[in-house]
Image: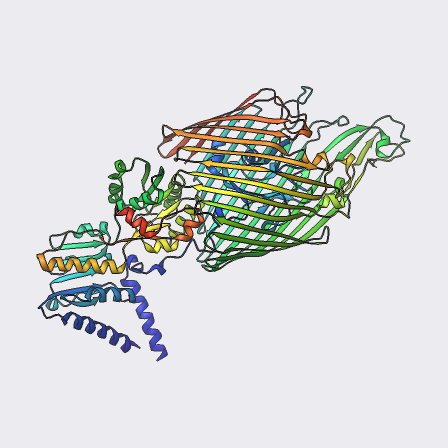
């Protein structure tokens, strides 16, 4: 059993390497570090590797030996961010890293594709759902960066009253504060802060929004399946494409683009929740077109 | 080999959990989050509900400035609200007979508060402060198929505030005309991994002020209540516990023969436990157990001719006797319900409800009575096509009191023009099994301590006696309605209109008074009319709610339309301004049928509230004025206030 698993892992690495060697140009070497080994991440690795003119090596939760290091270090998720400081690469790219957590690692040769969606994009989604009907939009936050993002939008949306409140995550006291916020609002926008929104807290939050005919937007697809109404989401394939685009940009221009939010995204809606709340919402594609201003 | 594999898997698990920050678990892995709002837990959208449903939410309760729960139902189209005494309210959809609220089912968090022993809903006995109500859903129409007996004309479903939503500390004091003096202390917190809310309330008022002759009325209310709710969420399950206690007394007017005050002391309690669990995201079940008890103590002295208590040879022209209307009631309920989503197009709700009632009273029963009932119910909602949805439901019930099987069906069809507009057609039948008082009453006053005595006889029995009719059959209703519901969500407007025609038969219509107690299934009633309701909330600062109903009745007895409004209107308007001030106005108008001389109820209320925020503590001062437009008596002929204007001041503190 143990041998079989290890064998599979090597086979995968070999396969990726062969795929990369397929092109004849002497190519860029990209070292991809995954936090864990699971099906969806393997799928991501193969999408990043598939037809490209760079060579991809995959490592699980560890950096390659410095002698083996390639040209670009590609890290997946927040947990691996400390590797940005410890590794010596001409270019380092964090894929699916939270924007706030990435900010201390900002450097000349380090960039990122954020795991979170910008607040402005989620507000656009709320606006597309409400179609401009005046409403109270609540947002609880721990990190002031989300509040600043929201604050910048106030003038743009005079029809909305933004109830933005810092709620330190400390168990039941924070849930009471959050529930109070839900009760004096119509929509709750979840920030991508796992201290506030996680498997343990989501039940209380969703049941409270549902009790008050309120609805939750964001922060990602998982929450929409759990019972949030909708969210802007970027799929693994979007991230694979973002990573490829960043690496190609580096190959062509010798530097990585600035850290950014994923430029490829879509909308996901929980139809059951919408129906139960009596909300009539356009389909995902129409909402996306509205968001993109088409 | 097996051991080695297990060892490896264990290592893998440990290694991956150690190396994994929380975010990794969610890395495109939706399974990490529980599905909270599962298809089985989600409620039907209002546009698909197989009945006409009205909602009174917290915002409306606050804006209305109403102090007593039953008065809220003036906001519901076609609903009659009246007070027999200041503390004795009757609420009935489509009115009919005001003698008792025996044709409506009233639930508080799923627990029925109908008291079978005295066949009534005693609104004054509910250990619940209006401030602790989250929302009220009123099903306008027979709903035995889902709610069991007594859901004859409709269902009032009161949902209290979840402990998670309540404030850590809330204090409120209210004072006003008519000796109104209320206090409320409410606290919410955590205990053993769950949340609780505890409320203590004290409520006093003087009821109506004068009778038709301008003499003082005695109908004051003094109530102290305790209400506790506890909620605990487990992995795939939820536990809810609730309990309440009320004690208090109400005063009553002296009858001609009374020499001491015929006041009543009440002591009530209830305990509820509910457990619900998910077998899968498409399969949800709950089990609930409720227990409640009411003790009523009413003892007084009267003076009357001895012939009235069976002593015609007594030498004194008058004797003094002790009388009582004491009673004790208990009720136990067990309910199991199963909700299953078979496919996105088919959902079923089915279950069983077992009920046991017991009452003992010397005066009403000369002993005690009990009744048992069992109900099986099943409802299915089915999406026939994109435009058409259907609901079919039925309930089978057997009550030991009449020992007959009753089947109550309901069918409905919805046609959805589009997502905003739907038409509905509903046919439903319901029964109301006769209650214990109607079938088994053995009602007379047993006089004690007769003074002076004659031949050493100190006890006697009032010569007028009322006896129940054991052959009574269940009352029946069949109801037809067509309706239209529109939801203009982007301007915040909801509109509903309903046309109905109801046939009620086998009605037991006589008033339950000792001297004219002859329960017979002798009457029928036809009601038809139109009802409409509009809710408009264009922005969070505005709220407008209005209702109107026109009802035409045709009956074999005046009693059955004594409480029916022929025209019934309500409007509530509320506006928030300066971010901390709210002004609300409401208007209630109800006109009785011609048989009651088109008697009207006409009142306007105003509420002005201002909130201050002092370092995390909200302080609110509210003023309520109620102005009565007519000088009619309310419901009965001795219910008058001296002044047209009555005022209330409320100070509250929220921390």
On the question of residue A90 being in view, the answer is no
- Return the residue found at the far front: B417
Q: Residue at x 84, y 26 (%)?
A: B318
Give residue A8's position: percent from left, percent from top: 26, 75
Q: Nearer the viewer, residue A224 or A111?
A: A224
Furthest-right residue in this view: B313
- Looking at the figure, which quarter contains the N terminus of chain B? bottom left
In the figure, B270 relative to B212: above or below?
Answer: below
Residue B527: % across, % down: 64, 39
Quadrant in the picture for residue A92: bottom left
Q: Position of residue A184 (x, y in %)?
A: 39, 38
Compared across the picture, whether A22 is left or right of B65 comes to: left
Left/right of residue B189 with respect to residue A167 in the rendered view: right
Screen quadrant of the C terminus of chain B: top left
Residue B398 appears left or right of A245: right
Q: Nearer the viewer, residue B387 or B118?
A: B387
């Amino acid at each position: 059993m143990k041998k079989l698993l290890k064998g599979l892992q090597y086979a995968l690495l070999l396969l990726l390497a062969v795929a990369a060697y397929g092109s004849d140009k002497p190519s860029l070497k990209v070292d991809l570090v995954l936090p864990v080994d699971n099906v969806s991440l393997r799928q991501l690795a193969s999408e990043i590797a598939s037809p490209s003119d760079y060579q991809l090596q995959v490592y699980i939760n560890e950096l390659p030996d410095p002698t083996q290091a390639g040209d670009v270090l590609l890290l997946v998720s927040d947990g691996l961010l400390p590797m940005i400081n410890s590794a010596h690469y001409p270019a380092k790219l964090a894929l699916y890293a939270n924007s706030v957590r990435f900010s201390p690692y900002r450097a000349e040769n380090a960039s990122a594709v954020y795991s979170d969606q910008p607040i402005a994009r989620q507000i656009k989604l709320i606006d597309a759902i409400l179609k401009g009907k005046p409403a109270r939009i609540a947002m609880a936050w721990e990190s002031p960066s989300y509040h600043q993002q929201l604050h910048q939008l106030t003038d743009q949306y005079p029809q909305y009253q933004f109830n933005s409140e810092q709620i330190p995550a400390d168990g039941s006291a924070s849930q009471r504060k959050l529930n109070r916020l839900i009760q004096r609002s119509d929509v709750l926008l979840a920030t991508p802060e796992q201290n506030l929104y996680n498997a343990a807290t989501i039940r209380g939050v969703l049941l409270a929004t549902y009790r008050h005919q309120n609805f939750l937007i964001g922060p990602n697809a998982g929450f929409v399946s759990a019972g949030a109404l909708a969210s802007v989401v970027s799929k693994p394939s979007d991230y694979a494409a973002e990573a490829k685009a960043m690496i190609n940009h580096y190959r062509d221009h010798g530097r990585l683009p600035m850290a950014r939010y994923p430029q490829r995204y879509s909308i996901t809606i929980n139809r059951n929740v919408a129906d139960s709340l009596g909300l009539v919402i356009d389909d995902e594609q129409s909402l996306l077109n509205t968001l993109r201003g088409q | 080999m097996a051991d080695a594999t297990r060892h490896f898997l264990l290592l893998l698990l440990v290694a991956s959990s150690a190396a994994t920050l929380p975010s990794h678990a969610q890395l495109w892995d939706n399974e990490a989050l529980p599905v909270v709002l599962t298809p089985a837990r989600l409620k039907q959208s209002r546009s698909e509900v197989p009945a006409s449903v009205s909602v009174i939410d917290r915002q409306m309760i606050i804006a209305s400035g109403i102090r007593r729960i039953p008065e809220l139902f003036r906001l519901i189209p076609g609903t009659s609200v009246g007070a027999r005494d200041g503390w004795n309210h009757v609420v009935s959809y489509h009115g009919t007979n005001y003698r008792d609220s025996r044709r409506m089912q009233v639930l508080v968090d799923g627990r029925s508060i109908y008291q079978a022993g005295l066949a009534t809903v005693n609104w004054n006995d509910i250990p619940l402060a209006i401030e602790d109500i989250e929302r009220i859903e009123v099903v306008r129409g027979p709903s035995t198929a889902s709610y069991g007996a007594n859901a004859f004309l409709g269902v009032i479903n009161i949902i209290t505030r979840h402990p998670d939503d309540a404030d850590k500390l809330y204090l409120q004091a209210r004072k006003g005309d008519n000796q109104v003096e209320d206090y409320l202390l409410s606290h919410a917190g955590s205990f053993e991994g769950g949340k609780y809310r505890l409320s203590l309330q004290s409520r006093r008022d003087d009821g109506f002020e004068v009778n038709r002759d301008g003499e003082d009325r005695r109908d004051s209310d003094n109530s102290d209540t305790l209400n506790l709710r506890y909620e605990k969420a487990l992995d795939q399950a939820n536990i809810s516990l609730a309990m309440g206690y009320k004690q208090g007394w109400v005063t009553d007017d002296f009858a001609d023969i009374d020499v001491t005050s015929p006041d009543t002391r009440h002591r009530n309690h209830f305990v509820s436990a509910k457990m619900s669990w998910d077998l899968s995201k498409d399969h949800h079940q709950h089990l609930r157990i409720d227990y409640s008890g009411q003790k009523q103590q009413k003892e007084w002295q009267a003076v009357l001719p001895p012939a009235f208590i069976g002593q015609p040879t007594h030498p004194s022209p008058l004797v003094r006797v002790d009388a009582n209307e004491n009673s004790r009631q208990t009720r136990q309920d067990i309910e199991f319900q199963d909700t299953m989503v078979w496919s996105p197009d088919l959902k079923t709700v089915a279950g069983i409800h077992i009920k046991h009632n017991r009452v003992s009273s010397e005066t009403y029963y000369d002993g005690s009575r009990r009744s048992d009932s069992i109900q099986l119910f099943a409802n299915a909602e089915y999406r026939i096509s994109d435009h058409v949805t259907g609901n079919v439901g039925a309930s089978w019930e057997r009550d030991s009191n009449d020992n007959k099987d009753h089947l109550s069906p309901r069918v409905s069809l919805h046609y959805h023009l589009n997502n905003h507009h739907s038409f509905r057609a509903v046919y439903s039948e319901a029964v109301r099994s006769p209650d214990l008082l109607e079938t088994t009453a053995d009602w007379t006053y047993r006089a004690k301590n007769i003074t002076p005595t004659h031949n050493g006889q100190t006890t006697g029995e009032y010569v007028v006696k009322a006896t129940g009719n054991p052959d009574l059959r269940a009352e029946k209703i069949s109801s037809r309605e067509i309706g239209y519901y529109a939801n203009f969500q982007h301007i915040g407007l909801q509109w509903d209109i309903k046309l109905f025609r109801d046939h009620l038969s086998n009605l037991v219509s006589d008033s339950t008074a000792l001297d004219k107690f002859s329960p017979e299934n002798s009457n029928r009633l036809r009601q038809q009319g139109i009802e409409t309701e509009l809710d408009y909330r264009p922005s969070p600062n505005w709220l407008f709610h209005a209702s109107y109903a026109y009802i035409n009745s045709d009956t074999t007895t005046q009693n059955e339309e004594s409480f029916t409004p022929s025209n019934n209107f309500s409007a509530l308007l509320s506006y928030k301004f300066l971010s901390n001030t709210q002004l609300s106005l409401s208007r209630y108008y109800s006109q009785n049928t011609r048989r009651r001389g088109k008697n009207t109820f006409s009142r306007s209320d105003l509420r002005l509230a201002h909130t201050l925020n002092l370092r995390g503590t909200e302080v609110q001062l509210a003023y309520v004025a109620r102005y009565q437009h007519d000088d009619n008596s309310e419901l009965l002929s001795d219910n008058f206030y001296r002044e047209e204007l009555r005022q209330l001041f409320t100070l509250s503190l929220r921390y």
